[in-house]
Amino acid sequence: MLKTASRLTCWILHLVPAVGMAAVVEPTEFFEKRIRPLLLEHCTECHGADKQKGSLRLDHRGGWEIGGDSGPSIVPGKIEDSLLWKVVSYEDRDLKMPPKKKLPAAALEDLKTWIANGAHDPRDDAPSVKGSHSSPKADGSFWSFQPPTAKLPAPVKKTDWAYNAIDHFILSKLESEGAKPAPEADVSTLTRRLSFDLTGLPPGKDASNISKADQTVTDPVKLEELEELVDTMLATPAFAERWASHFMDITRFAESSGGGRSLPFKDAWRFRDYLLEAIQSNVPVDRMITQMIAGDLMPAKNAAERSMNLTATGFLALGPTNYEEQDKQMLRMDIVDEQLDTIGKSFMGMTIGCARCHDHKFDPIPTRDYYAMAGILRSTRTLKNYTDNVAHWIDTPLPYEGEEEIKMQEKEKAMARLTDEIASLKNDLGDIGGAALRKRATLSIDDLPGVVVDDSAAQKVGYWKESKMYPPFIGQGYVSDYNEAKGEKTLTFTPKLPQAGRYEVRLAFSAGPGRALRIPATIFHADGEELVYFKQSTEGLKGLQFVSLGTFRFEKTGQNFVMISNAGSEGYVTVDAVQFLPTDMEMPEVQKPVVSEEETQIQTRLAALSKQLRLLQRDGPIRQEAMTVAEDEKPEDARIHVRGNIRNLGATVPRGFIQVATKGEVPEIHANQSGRLQLAQWMTGRNHPLTARVFVNRVWHWIFGTGIVRSTDNFGITGELPSHPELLDYLAVKFMEDGWSLKRLVKEMVMSRTYRMSSEGTIAENDPDNRLLARMNRKRLDAECIRDAMLIAADSVDARWAGPNIGDAKAVDSNDTKVQNMEYSYPFNDSRRSVYTAAFRNVRHPLFEVFDFADINQPISQRTTSTVATQALYLMNNPQVIELARATAQKVMTADTMEQGIHQAYQRSLNRNASQEEVKIAEDFLDASISGNSTEDETRDAWARLIQTLWATPEFRFVK
């Protein structure tokens, strides 16, 4: 019962990604990355294979389920009933674990999340004493670690059946098992199958030439017409759009960070466009892989190719990342781990990430190999720096061609000159008042304009030392945090404003060389709250200074206050007073600052230059940017992180690759290089045993509905064995010999007689899952195809190719707490193809959620396919579906006769005419729903209900 509850909780967790494990949704991944290292570091020394204090073991699931002398230690899903939580949270005064020191807050939060979400634990077996293995483990002789070699298929009896080599391999296996292939699918079935598989859309005018006047829809297809149709579809932009969706799945494409404060990726769409352009142009897949991993290091013939290479590296930058992580070295290693895990799963079908804390439990990937590859990615910059409170990815300017690049550079130089002059004037302007005040011996709050709140009137949390070291100061002195107890001290200033309006908030402080560079201030105003950062450190100037925290709207009464904190600051934090200067023209009750002639001149000049800069920014070319990575200035090898702990470092490992997958010579990594280019070259080498195999198997899965290796993302010992190993190797070798051409690979598969079989064949008793492919598999349309099919039926699709898809996507201040609003309130009301639908990590299009869209937090090529009640309810009740059905109804209800309208409804929805029986049923429904007194809207809605009924049928949602 306990295991069932745990599995149920984990299943629910998949459906609700925002609960607890938002950054790593998959329960096993959360356990491996967060819980196993925690248990290894803090618990298993006393509660493991060698020692069991209190008779409790925590080194496998059965240990905590049985528990120790006090009974079960964890009740999955129930924190308050879990003894383990009580002892680690130090709730019990007499029993505290670990006894020497309480777990860190982050570790406690992870443990709490794990227990609350069902305590998923994949450790089925109890480990033996140290040095032994209790589980089977693959070695270098495992099939997937051998380079693929092409072999001829065995002879077949039915010599006239096979069209190409694929058919020979399939038929040979069928005949050896005493099975027969199904007959060919008819024209109507095959065209619909082809259209959805190749373009993701219902068959259109390009499919019309496959059926001639002397044919019926139930006749077999003519091969020359089929080939012409396939070539036409492969050349269309729709093919690139359809197959870009597959690539987006395996590269975990998203347009927001997902972790912590979810930040929108304003330029993520450029990576999606890179995929579109590369697939449309049939860029070899090995080159695509190299571009994604090391495009910035590849030579380019022109600016367009350079832009493409740079944009492709967004693959490494687009992962789910908690940019708010304050331990920047932990953040750095978490990013490297996510990148390694993604590379392993996306291209090699290997769970490399499992080796971060220990040798891989099943596959021959030791921890040393993990850190050999980690050194490559640690020598790569993914973040701008590792000092910002909220980190940020790298935005790289993209080049233009020829004359346009020259004009862009001239514009940028002019903008830089204006920006520097404006900054200089602002510094002069900001120091005019300060310089005058520093000449005075003493200052009172009455000497300053606006509303001034002295430090003596502020609400203090923590100890603030009073000081008079550097006069002048406002009032009786100023206060300092004394560079101690960071994060434990705040000062809150609450003004008494004479009237509502906009005020500039200025902080007075004592500057100096030892002051902090980055200090947080939170302003609570009428429109919400704002977190800003400012610096106090100066090289030579000491004493009174003012810094502007911004201009905000305040109410006369209400929660108006400014809170200064010393959290995250390095150096002394000093505070003297906070000044609220009115910016509205009509505020007679508030003293205005006296404006000197010098200040007036500076402000005039500043206004003129600012206007000039705005005009320059608006006119002429605009420099585009892409999310990229870059080489680190000082590449270095990584040290093993013992048990995955960034502060428990072991031996240094030279940068390199997974040894078990290394056959023959490997590219040499020079000391001044990260090794990313060599990594890509190794992965796409002719002797690499995994990359080509994994890719062709995924294409087979996308075409045939299930892979030759059904565990498409796992080619290790815990994955499935191939049903047709010789066919898999043949396809991998031919794929490489054909120049890694996706289009040639797809064409060979869909032209095969195996693909052209009917899905209505007999189910063999010894092959209920159709692993032998005696018939074509029936496939459920994925979420994108269902949405796009409804848009096509309604003639509502926006056919624009590529380009940005989120109008509000722009550069954001990552310290602004409001940046998440766009994601959580996004309306999803566009009508472009689904490949362009906003791909936020925490909020997806409702149809995508219902119809099993891929987990956007990790690379995945094999989506779940479910049939649940919520899908029918969505198609019945969703407002967007209803509107699309009404738009479709408007198209068909104007037909000359009701029968013609019904046929049109069937054609738009099911891509065929209605049978006579179906016409009769539809006519009866419409006659009962529409009377002579019905309005046009009522008539339209009756037709719309008919169309929704067709969309709810299995025939609409499945491809035969």
Image (cartoon, grey):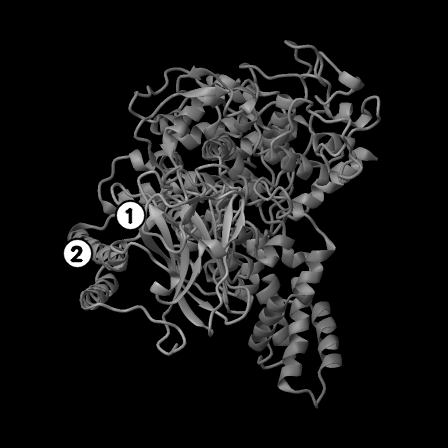
Q: Report the Cα–Cα distance between label 2 and label 1.
A: 17 Å
Q: Which mark is residue 414?
A: 2
Q: Residue at x 21, y 58 (%)?
A: 425
Crowd band around label 2 with a 10 angstrom C-alpha radius: few (<14), some (14–19), many (20+): some
Tell me, yes or no, whether the two marked residues, 2 and 1, touch with CB atoms within 8 Å: no
Give the side of residue 914 with respect to residue 427, left or right. Answer: right
Residue 173 in the image, given as x and y percentages of width and height: 62, 28
Q: Residue at x 73, y 13 (%)?
A: 51
Residue 139 seen from this side? yes
Q: Which mark is residue 397?
A: 1
Residue 803 seen from this side? no
Residue 112 in the image, given as x and y percentages of width and height: 68, 37
Q: Which mark is residue 778?
A: none
Name which quarter of the figure residue 769 lies in: top right
Position of the N terminus, as image quadrant, is top right
Give the side of residue 924 with respect to residue 899, left or right. Answer: right
- The residue type indicated by label 2 comes to Ala
User: Seen from this angle, which residue lies furthest bottom?
Assistant: 933
Depth check: give the residue in front, 200 or 822. 822
Q: Earlier in the sequence, mark 2 or mark 1?
A: 1
Q: Nearer the viewer, mark 2 or mark 1?
A: 2
